[in-house]
Image (spheres, rainbow, N blue to C red):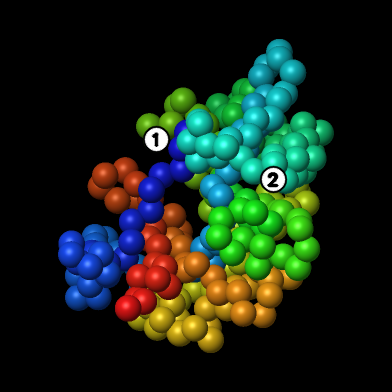
């Protein structure tokens, strides 16, 4: 599955493509008082599939956002070294992730690959030629679920990252919409929280989700994004 597109908080001016702060894109965005905020990393969207069958050998696959996306060489080396079958088996046991009592399941890790030669300025996230991966979402397939499976909460995502020996995208805390907008506009507050970044490296923006996880009437999760460049003149 391709990671669902996340709406921007505001509508955009059709001519300038800048956000219009007077027009909230969806009325549901006004319902929660507080949002869980994470840093949006300027990198490459990566999907890591782990599948365990009842009588088949478990395996791991790696993809970019689309099926034809080309993963950069360094990142293509990093992923299989980090997400081995052995590591995945320890993190996703049938006891922890049962699907209708069965011992077979498919789980997808969604994250951002970043670092050297990934996107313009990607090398600013690291002080050497390395690359890395930050987890931001996990989906567990379940055919009995009307949505096709389960999106996990941030606490669960953090636990999985810990078990895999990786990190999640930086968590910036619970905030009100007004606080989030003011923060994204403030360059001093938007310096990246990625360890090892150059001091002047700015984060791309933020991704905000409801807690607990809620869904809109179109079936999408209640979440939105906001980028620094949305306010640049």
Q: Is residue 134 left or right of residue 139?
A: right
Residue 206 seen in the figure: yes
Disc 2 crowd, CA 10 A, few/some/many (<14, 14-19, 20+): many
User: Is 91 rendered above or below residue 67?
Assistant: below
Disc 1 crowd, CA 10 A, few/some/many (<14, 14-19, 20+): few
Q: Is residue 118 left or right of residue 161?
A: left
Of residue 27 and residue 123, the one placed in the foreground of this image is 123
Q: Are marks 2 and 1 in contact (CB under 8 Å)?
A: no
Where is residue 75? Give x, y as percent.
69, 45
Quadrant (top left/top right/bottom left/bottom right) for the C terminus: bottom left
First reached walking from the N terminus: tag 2 or tag 1? 2
Residue 108 seen in the figure: no
User: Is 215 rendered above or below residue 35?
Assistant: above
User: Is 134 rendered above or below residue 180?
Assistant: above
Where is residue 186? Give x, y as percent.
45, 85
Which quadrant of the figure has residue 88?
A: top right
Q: Which mark is residue 147?
A: 1
Q: Secondary structure at mark 1?
A: loop
**Residue at the (55%, 60%) spot, across then down:** 120
Which quadrant of the figure has residue 148?
A: top left
Q: Is residue 232 left or right of residue 126?
A: left
* Residue for badge 2: 75
Of residue 31 and residue 201, the one placed in the foreground of this image is 201
Q: Which mark is residue 17?
A: none
């Amino acid at each position: 599955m391709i990671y669902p597109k996340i709406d921007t908080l505001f509508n955009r001016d059709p001519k300038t493509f800048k956000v219009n702060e007077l027009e909230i894109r969806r009325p549901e965005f006004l319902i929660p008082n507080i949002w869980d905020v994470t840093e949006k990393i300027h990198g490459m969207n990566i999907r890591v599939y782990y599948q365990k069958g009842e009588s088949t050998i478990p395996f791991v696959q790696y993809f970019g956002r689309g099926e034809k996306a080309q993963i950069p060489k360094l990142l293509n080396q990093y992923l299989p070294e980090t997400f081995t079958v052995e590591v995945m088996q320890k993190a996703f046991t049938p006891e922890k992730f049962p699907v209708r009592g069965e011992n077979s399941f498919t789980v997808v890790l969604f994250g951002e690959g970043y670092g050297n030669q990934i996107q313009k300025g990607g090398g600013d996230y690291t002080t050497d030629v390395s690359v890395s991966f930050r987890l931001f979402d996990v989906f567990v397939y379940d055919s009995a679920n009307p949505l096709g499976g389960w999106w996990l909460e941030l606490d669960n995502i953090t636990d999985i990252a810990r078990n895999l020996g990786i990190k999640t995208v930086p968590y910036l805390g619970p905030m009100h919409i007004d606080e989030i907008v003011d923060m994204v506009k403030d360059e001093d507050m938007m310096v990246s929280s990625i360890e090892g970044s150059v001091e002047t490296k700015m984060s791309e923006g933020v991704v905000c989700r409801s807690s607990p996880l809620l869904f809109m009437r179109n079936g999408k999760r209640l979440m939105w994004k906001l980028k620094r460049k949305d306010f640049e003149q």
